[in-house]
Image (tube, coloured by chain):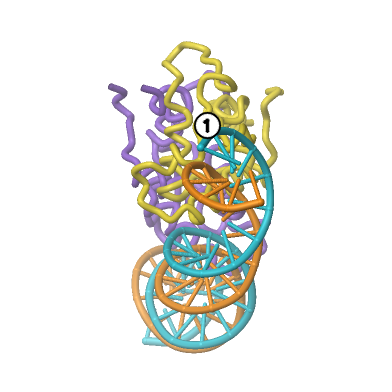
Chain colours: A yellow, B purple, C orange, D cyan
Amino acid sequence: MSNSKIDDDRLTEMFKALGNTHRLMIFKRLSSCCQPGTQCDLEQAMAYSVGELGEGLDIASSTLSHHLKELHRSGLIEMERQGKRVVCWIAPETLNSLGNFFNADIKR
Amino acid sequence: MSNSKIDDDRLTEMFKALGNTHRLMIFKRLSSCCQPGTQCDLEQAMAYSVGELGEGLDIASSTLSHHLKELHRSGLIEMERQGKRVVCWIAPETLNSLGNFFNADIKR
DNA sequence: TTTACTATTCGACATGTTTCGAACTATAGA
DNA sequence: TCTATAGTTCGAAACATGTCGAATAGTAAA
């Protein structure tokens, strides 16, 4: 019904990705632009570089890289090189899809 | 702000709990009563016994028990002995809290 | 081309997770 | 009290994850 339904395997991977303190912090930081009730432009406004996302996390850059790869593999974030940096942003449909899971998709 | 805000550690544990195929199946089964837009009586209507939750999952009962313990530890489900059986149900605030996370709580 | 900056890959290690079967506990009923 | 049913706990094995430092790769600027 919902056009943002995700299959169970994908969903499991997303939850697994969010089920780690460091990755959850990263995800929250990337989502922090969106004001309740507004439709923010995720793709443009909230691109953080890998380095920025690591600030305050106190982990090695190789570990950070690993976590970002996991978030990307699960479909939660997008990544793109821009010059010297690699920038990351929330995969646009993600917030809605996951919100729907707890509000509607899960129900029959 | 929200009265159903969950702290990050709790949230991480919940996502970790849902980041496993078997536990996600169990969680979905327990949530399956709720029709979109309605307020179902989770505490009463949707108590499944441990045995019922294991049907079709093809895992040992000890493994099932372990998964239910994880779901309970994370705060996603409640459990109670009723005679010979132990029944499980979704922790009432859970669906809303998690739905809010993706819709509002995450934003600043 | 050399250097500096930014990020990823690799290999290794320690720690966690998933799973099972066997042994155990709790309850209800014959 | 004995038996059957329903779950849990325990210990062990196999596998997965998180972490680091060292080595590597891509880009920009001197």
> Number of labelled discs?
1
As displayed, is residue D21 above or below residue A15?
below
Between A30 and B93, the one nearer to me in the picture: A30
Horizontal side of residue A92 vs A50, given as left or right:
right
Residue of label 1: A102
Observer-nearest residue: A40 or A46?
Answer: A46
Q: Give amino acid for label 1.
A: Phe
Q: Position of residue C19 (x, y in %)?
A: 60, 70
Residue C18 percent location from the top left of the image = 57, 64
Residue at horizontal 54 percent and vertical 50 percent from the top: A65
Q: Quick one: which residue is furthest to the top in this view?
A: A38
Residue beneath the point at 37% across and 54% down: B73
Q: Is residue B84 left or right of residue A86?
A: left
- Label 1 residue SS: helix
Comparing A57 with B56, the one in front is A57
Horizontal and vertical percent for residue B24? 57, 48
In this rendering, the answer to whether B32 lies above or below A36 is: below
